[in-house]
Amino acid sequence: MQMEIPRHDFPTRNAASVLDSRGGDFWQDVEALQDEPSWFSNALASGVQLWGLRCAVDPESDRFETWEACVTAMQVGSALFASAQATTDGIECRIGHKTHTIRAGALPRAHAGNWLTAFWLACVCREKKRMMAGLCRFPVSRLREADGIFDAYIYDWVRALQAYWLNGDKLVAAVDGIDPDALGHAPHDGVLQIMYPPMNLLSQLAHGDQDAFNAELAKALEWRKGYWARDEDRELNAQGFVALGPLAVACLTVQAGFTISVESEYLPERLLDGSRVNEFPT
């Protein structure tokens, strides 16, 4: 049975001017990486928000610019962790449609939150090589050296994802071992409505249960809608316009042969079906 979950309401009348402004800010952040890798968190957040704005005005991601924005955000996330592991002073990374020289030394920004963002983006873009060779081989111990304070379950989750992709280890035990009510630094609604659903969805994928996956996906999007519609500041945050974690896992299930029976602007159709993958070099 097909289920439809509308995205939360937000004004789009000024979207074009906001896109122009955010686009300029994003590319300034990217250019700054040539000299100062501390700009990586800004560049990644700006890239994700720019992509979210593109999806806001292009809900099905039909336009080339929407896919381009998704790939560019993914490239920044990949470059961050390449910079953090570099043994030379600088590295060459493709961001957008050209190669940029990026200064090494991004380890303080290579924290678990940015790792998850970079990993989910790589899943949406079907960039298995980046997932396996770059992100899944980045030591969890180095994530702990980075800036930021994260609860222990986040590191357990990263470790479980890495083991799943590198060794075929099952995710079920790791997911079942995470209690979303065992709160640390994260607010309760952030854990339950944003962090937990991708873990739960991957557990359904690991079980191979298509019906359960679709039921849990619908629930995850309803939770997400409740989270981002809670107040005006959240409603206007472009990060909430796409369900990055659930979208990423849904992309994986499509690759695994599942049929997704949930329709939502949180899951842009052309990104979900992968129809633009390989459209240009990444």
Image (spheres, rainbow, N blue to C red):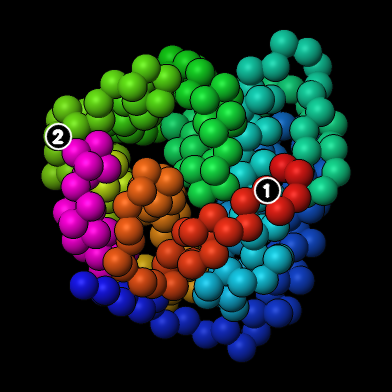
Q: Residue furthest front?
A: 257
Q: Disc 1 residue type?
A: Asn
Q: Which mark is residue 278?
A: 1
Q: Residue furthest top?
A: 87
Marks 1,2: beta carbons within 8 A: no
Q: Horizontal and vertical percent for residue 163? A: 36, 20
The answer to whether residue 265 is magenta is no
Quadrant, the C terminus: top right
Give x and y (percent) for residue 220. Answer: 26, 59
Q: In the image, which residues are magenta?
A: 204-224
Left or right: residue 144 compared with residue 31: left
Rendered residue at 47%/81% (across/down)? 10
Where disc 2 sits, the SS reads helix
Q: Is residue 176 above or below residue 67?
A: above
Q: Which mark is residue 176?
A: 2
Q: Is residue 217 left or right of residue 14?
A: left
Viewed as shown, does residue 2 lie left or right of 55? left
SS assignment for the magenta stretch, majority:
helix
Q: Quadrant of residue 233?
A: bottom left
For the residues labelled 1 and 2, the Cα–Cα distance comes to: 36 Å
- The residue nearer to you, when weighing 69 against 41, is 69
Q: Is residue 95 above or below residue 129?
A: below
Location of residue 157 in the rendering, given as x and y in whole percent from the top left corner = 31, 31
